Amino acid sequence: MTSPTETPGTAPARPGAPAPTAGPTLEVTGLTTTFDRGGRQVLAVRGVDVSVGPGESLVLLGESGSGKSVTIRSILRLYGSSARHTGSVVLGEEDLMQLDPAAVRAVRGRTIAMVPQDPNGSLDPLRPVGRQLEQVLRLHGVVDDRRAARARALELLALVGIPSPARVAGSHPHELSGGMRQRVAIAIAVACDPVVLLADEPTTALDVTVQSQILDLFGDLQERLGTALLLVTHDVSVAADVADRVAVMYAGSIVEEGPAQQVLENPRHPYTQALLDAIPRPTSERGHLKAIPGSPPVAGTGFHGCSFADRCALAEESCRTQPPALLPVADGHRAACPVANPVVAA
Amino acid sequence: MTTQAPALAPAAVSRPRTARRSRRLPAPALVSAVVLAVVAALTLLAPLISPYGPLEGDLAARLQPIGSPGHLLGTDGQGRDVLTRLLHGARPSLLAGLLPVVFAAAVGIVLGLVAALGHPRVHTFVMRSLDVLYAFPAVLLAIAIAAALGSGISNAIIALAVILVPPVARVTESEAMRIKSADFMAAAQVSGAGRVSIALRQVLPNVAPGVAVYATALVGLSIVYAAGLSYLGLGVSPPTAEWGVMVSEMQQYLFTAPLLLLVPAVAILVVSVAFNVLGDGLRDFFNVRTDAS
Amino acid sequence: MSPAGAPGPAGEKLLDVVDLAKTFPNGTRAADDVSFTVARGETLGVVGESGCGKSTTAKMVLRLLQPDRGAVTFAGTDVLRAHGRDLKEVRRRLQLVPQNPQTSFNPRLTVRSSLEFNLRAHGVARRTWRSTVDDMLVRCGLRAEQGDSYPHELSGGQLQRAAIARALVTGPDLVVCDEAVSALDKSVQAQVLNLLAELQADLGVSYLFISHDLSVVEHISDRVLVMYLGRVVEQATAGSLYRDPAHPYTRALLSSAPGAPGERIVLTGEPPDPADPPSGCTFRTRCPWVMDKCAADRPLLEVTPAGSLAACHLNLTSPPALAAPSPA
């Protein structure tokens, strides 16, 4: 086990100061994840390229089975030996895919941290949450002694908008509401000033009115700490709320990626368009929602051409044979649909 | 970390929803099933294939060792052929193992369902009554009941059935309680169907596999208990061939012909273990269906 | 069996719920004087966050849970006291589409067997089962042979169609949809919402549509009930709820919906413990417009200037104040 202080590139970013290196904090290139399911190879992530810079928030938007959660779990190498990966995940100077498991563990929680969907699963039900936060701080050597750990824990709880940190620190998880627990989970995630924060459906288990509070907290933390955020959600309104950039995933691939406003208001991929159309709006006539026929493919389904072709209104013969490439369609905006975005002769 | 070319080629088209673990019994259970099938065949064919009559003894050829000419498994203290008695003894031994379980399963399932799906007071009454039976050690209770009823195979079967009812009812009740809170039970209730219909058509199909698996394992136990009762003279009585009786008879020759004693003992052991292993295998087999995501 | 049950004139009052109340043994006040009606052919939406009592109310209407007090009258029958044939008839005409399609079907029965179970319960002749089930499956967008599948062999969307078919197969007048589209992917959710609307137009069935998702409720419903902490805080037609929300809680809910115009109202804090609700107005602890009066008096549902019903003191004293919120 490498001592955390010896691990290169993990010097905690100071609050407010973005990482010194220009360019993306986290750069994922050609990431694939394959699971072995009883001898059957299931390709759950089929070559994903994303990058997120300091203070930026990127949302991976997709439905069940799209591979969005597998993508961020793969970035953290959480599947261990049960999955095979190709591609690279460059964080600062290091490629996480090339590190040995011990080195990855040292990076996890310190340089790159994750906020879970359900904080109940990640908090120890038997210990006060303050203790758990202190343990994380001491485990990663952020603070030297107990007293400092305690002080820093209270600071962090205040940072995530908990009104009475001292009282909450002494509470057990079951004594806290869902929103409070999620705030504690976020405090633990940002405890070591991570450069990148990953979040898997962090508000899905919460009520709408609490959801907006937590989403605001993410924005607030990013502003103060300069953290890069990679958030996974199935909810378009969540994406609209927090994203600088949105990457839409379908069947293990990114089908469209670009600035949030452009992607959500002027989508260039038929799937994104259809997904937005399917959401009931005050103007949509009852019984006439623009539904997408069929259902999303089950994770690992193989395709010869475009994965959306079977459900797409624009599909042509070529769509079923030619896998579409993710090509630029506007400034910083890419889409994987040659039919909706014909190449204009340059 | 292997550095292959990015595997962007389409993966084999798969349908995980329907693809599931192969629906086959695990190997040990399969072996057990084969063993039990062979035992069952030999049991049925006993009168045809056994070389002698079960009571036919030759006092001149007492305690012949295993492998003697004309007596493959030797002879007992009265010069009767052990192989013959083993084959003929299989029928009462297996019946005394199976029938109590069949009776206990029938009664136990009904009691378990009534307890789980009935009024809370009915639940308390049924379960506490069963607890009374639980308060006595099962073997002693079986001996007491058999002794009270008098010796004979049917009384042994009754005694064993009585002691096996509480565990079957317990298993049924706990499975049914779990099913009771399942989402589909709300839909079943809203359908307007009566309680009996819900119990038989919605709950029973979910409870039956678990109980069947449990009962299979109980058969092994029941065979041992039945042999035990016969050994004590409370089940089948000599000179009828039965495995427990055989053990009891051979016991006096423990020091002169110990291997002969092992013959019926091994038969009891093999059949009882086979039922247990088969029960385990069936549980794995059925779980495949229940864990549908 | 005629698919729409005993036909009656549209607009006739079908379900009448009066002052339904339920407090659980742990002190949670799940429903506190909930009253509403559903007319024939109408969709009443019920919206609210977790713990607001919407599912408890649905369970009491379906007589899956006994209320502490209150009355439920369905097509002239007292649901809570019905027994024998009357209860059976209520069951036939009052059906349920549960939330989770994966668990709402018995895993050991085929979809067809599950639908036939409902037909059997009402003494429908066995020889008609196959055609009745096939018709209903096809009507709900499935292929007849999919009826012979086990639940784990179908997708969530397909199963939810089957659940709708199961609810409709005995020809009910009212179907309670308890979060019926919440577990579905958005692209599939739209299909199921369209199906529900189509079936309503064809069969004249009424829905009691319960969901936490305001945009879905607003889309499918004629009228909407907004619940908070066991109480109805607003009741309005879907259109006017969207245009002129009267209750501050409704306004907050609306403003957090996607594509909502205007400034977002971010509520502070979280819903209080339902076992220990605040005095007076239960929303006062999170309300940006809270007044002294709110702690003392429980506001009752009263007619608002927009013609809907809302339980808010503000609404009656100074309606225009809502236009200029000043969140503390």
Image (cartoon, coloured by chain):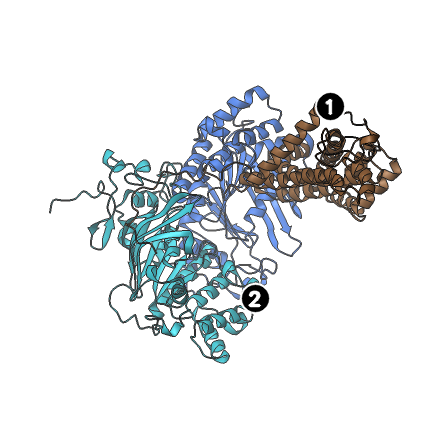
Q: Residue furthest left?
A: A346
Secondary structure found at label 1? helix
- Left or right: residue A309 versus residue C212 is left
Q: Which chain is blue?
A: C
- Left or right: residue B223 versus residue C273 is right
The image quarter in which residue A155 lies: bottom left
Q: Is residue A343 above or below residue C122?
A: below
Report x, y in % for residue C184: 44, 43
Q: Is residue A262 above or below residue B115?
A: below
Query: A262 or C93, which is in the foreground?
Result: A262
Query: Do callouts 2 and 1 mark residues in contact (Cβ within 8 Å)?
Result: no
Q: Which residue is mark 2?
A: A172
Query: B274 or B134, which is in the foreground?
Result: B274
Q: Which mark is residue A151?
A: none
What shade has chain B been given?
A: brown
Q: Give the chain letter at badge 1.
A: B
- Residue occupying image coordinates x 72% and y 25%: B50
Report x, y in % for residue C265: 41, 59
Query: C80 or A76, which is in the foreground?
Result: A76
Count of all numbered marks drawn on residues in the image: 2
Task: Measure the alpha-carbon separation of dots 2 and 1.
Answer: 72 Å
Report x, y in % for residue B41: 66, 27
What shade has chain A been given?
A: cyan
Q: Is residue B54 above or below residue C285?
A: above
Amino acid type at mark 2: His
Classed neighbour count for the residue bearing mark 2: other residues with Cα under 10 Å, few (<14), some (14–19), many (≥20) = some
Amino acid type at mark 1: Pro
- Residue occupying image coordinates x 37% and y 39%: A289
Q: Which mark is residue B47?
A: 1
Question: Can I make out residue C65 in this image?
Answer: yes
